[in-house]
Amino acid sequence: MGEENAKTPVDDTRLQELIDSLVANPKDEAAEREFWKLFCNLPAWIFLTTAEDARQTIEQKSAEIRVQMFKDGDRTLLPIFSSQERTRGLLEGEELANLSMPPEAALAYVCGFRGRIDGFIVNPMPGKSGGFGHRLPDLCAFFRSERGVLPAGAIHCAVDHARNTRHPAAFLMVHEIIAGLEKIYVGVKDDSFAFVKEGDDLWLWAFSDAAMAVRACQQHEGLKMIEATPAQLAERAKQAIEQSEGRVKGVVLNHPEASVAIDLDVLAKAMEAAGSASPEG
């Protein structure tokens, strides 16, 4: 699908027609399916930032990018535009600029706003069009359906989607992200594994990103994180389960901020599909 869409430019006019149709009739399933196909395969997603931030980003003086948000009543929405042309009416007379990202990088960036925004909205034009939007967990599911992949930065929103839907495909989506991670951070204390306790059960404690691992270390004296590949984590978890005679149940990822229990069988299949099933080191 990716190669086909790379050769065929996305029709931005048609995308806007679908948005207008969905604003009028949000339950039009055929229009929504076509919208997601076009939106997820755009060459870039466009955000609004300040002219000063755009200038500093270009000059590499600042790694922080502040994007503009929209308020819809009590909701805070992140606007995303399908082309530079769709922002022209918003830029006139304002100290604003466009920030363009490839969709996969943009999705990871958008997911970084989890917990701070209520969702995203595509091509909003104040006073003209309401735009079409959704929640971030749903965006991840639709993106994966259309592109077949999800960036590592989307894992927390993917977990939200799995919790919301309780669908096996949603949990598979989470495990596919885990299988594609270059590094996982495993908790160690006093030269042995650190565990999360649930009743009489124990779970190996691991994290998908360094920032969460650092926060956990700061909260527990003597805790440190060591790096492992997903395959190494799976191997260590199996050994711990066998040696504990079943008291260790498996691995919990990102506890307690955005925790999810890893199913080792599902992870093994995801790693096999990703070509990363063999432990390293």
Image (tube, grey):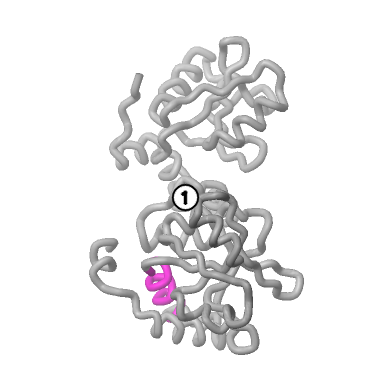
Q: Residue furthest top?
A: 191
| Relative horizontal placement of residue 140, taking residue 14 as reference (left or right) | right
Q: Residue at x 46, y 45 (%)?
A: 152
- Which three-letter amino acid code belongs to the residue tagged 1? Pro
In the displayed structure, 113 sits above or below 86; it is: above
Residues packed near mark 1 inside 10 Å, few (<14), some (14 to 19) or many (20 plus):
few
In the displayed structure, 87 sits above or below 166; it is: below
In the image shown, does 101 or 233 lie closer to the viewer?
101
Numbered disc 1: secondary structure:
helix
Q: Where is mark 1, residue-wise?
A: 168
| Relative horizontal placement of residue 35, taking residue 69 as reference (left or right) | left
Give the quadrant of residue 50.
Answer: bottom right
Q: Residue at x 39, y 84 (%)?
A: 14
| Quadrant containing the N terminus in the rendered view | bottom left
| Relative horizontal placement of residue 89, taking residue 148 as reference (left or right) | right
Q: Quick check: can you spot residue 120?
A: no
Residue 56's x, y, as percent? 56, 56
In the image shown, does 69 or 77 lie closer to the viewer?
69
Q: Which residues are magenta?
A: 31-42
Q: Residue at x 37, y 63 (%)?
A: 146
In the displayed structure, 275 sits above or below 81; it is: above
In the image shown, does 142 or 169 lie closer to the viewer?
142
Q: Can residue 155 be found in the magenta stretch?
A: no
Q: Quick check: can you spot residue 175?
A: yes
Q: Residue at x 41, y 44 (%)?
A: 176
Give the quadrant of residue 203.
Answer: top right
